[in-house]
Image (cartoon, rainbow, N blue to C red):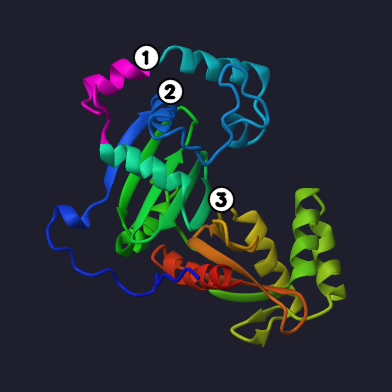
Amino acid sequence: MVTIDLTTPPAPPASFLDGMARRLALTLPELRLVAELAGGAPLPFDLATADAPGAGSLSGRLGQSRGSVEDSAYSDALGTLHDPHDTLRRRGLLTDDGADPGVVGAVGLLATPRLALDIDVAAGSMQVKAWHRHSGGAVASLSTCDGIVFELAWFPADQWTVELARVTAVPEDLPLSTSHVPARLDVPYALADAIGEALHSGRSDLVPVLIGQADGAVLVDGDPLGDAEAAAAVSAVHSESRGRLRILAAEVGERATTAVGVVSWVLLRDGWHSLTPRHDDGARVAVVRVDPDDLATELAPVLAQVATS
């Protein structure tokens, strides 16, 4: 069974360098070469041929399906990259004895973890895919926003909390303001889903009708809202949305089960709000204002549940 505590602050590092994650930018060809040198280690995403990046390839999975023009631009961009053997040698990451041991070890950890996080973050026009892999006392992460350049990082497990906080950084071009969504909102799931569909279809006139027919009240800090206030609050969850975060957590390995845990956040005008399903009083969803540093705290019980399933 895997256990890891993300709620306890990391221990003070013995030295300045011990407290820092090692980070390295690698192009897709360089990453592929390092994976080959790491014994053919599989990377945590689908490496369909870069010359024909379809819906199943990394480039297609980074967002909506790309048109033929964008596919061609992606292939052209990859085609302009230099030979990875040359670029890695110039950077001192590859010698006649092989690739840098730290880089090889990080890629190896990506392929042989005990705990795996697949992270998808979208904020404004930015979308980032990241993969965090944990085993023993170490974590390796890989992230990209374009499928061409990747950030590879590796660090001690007690620094994972710090690295997770980076995932929730709000882009500077999305300034925070005041939200019409209360800090603690509790909504019947069917109502939240129906109002979202009505707004998406341009039928905001249906929102009061849906509120009136809802099976269950809209609550703020446990107290029911009036129909007008409830309609405004639930509508704002959809209309203010500027981004979302989704993390899939799983234990992997020979003895692991197929249990998967999920953490979902939505980015509103005032920042991140967690979306947590509840089933103790019917199917409901809690929408709660959270700080970026709260991600590790929310993720810890999910990892614990996955690891003990």
Q: Do the residues labelled 1 and 2 touch (CB within 8 Å)?
A: yes
Residue located at (36% from left, 40% from top): 152
Magenta stretch in the rendered image: 84-100
Determine the CA span between mark 1 and mark 2.
8 Å
Query: Which residue is denoted by mark 2 in the rendering?
Result: 29
Amino acid type, mark 3:
Arg
The numbered dot on residue 55 is none
Q: What residue sits right under mark 3 in the picture?
A: 242
Q: Give the image location of residue 73, x and y in percent.
A: 55, 16
Q: Tell me the quadrant of the picture where the C terminus can be found.
A: bottom right
Up-down relation of residue 219 to residue 232 (above or below): below
Is 127 displayed left or right of 152 in the figure? right
Q: Which residue is painted at 39% across and 40% down in the image? A: 107
User: Is 88 within the magenta?
Assistant: yes
Secondary structure state at the residue bearing disc 2:
helix
**Residue that sits furthest to the left in the current view:** 15
Badge nearest the viewer, 1 or 3: 1
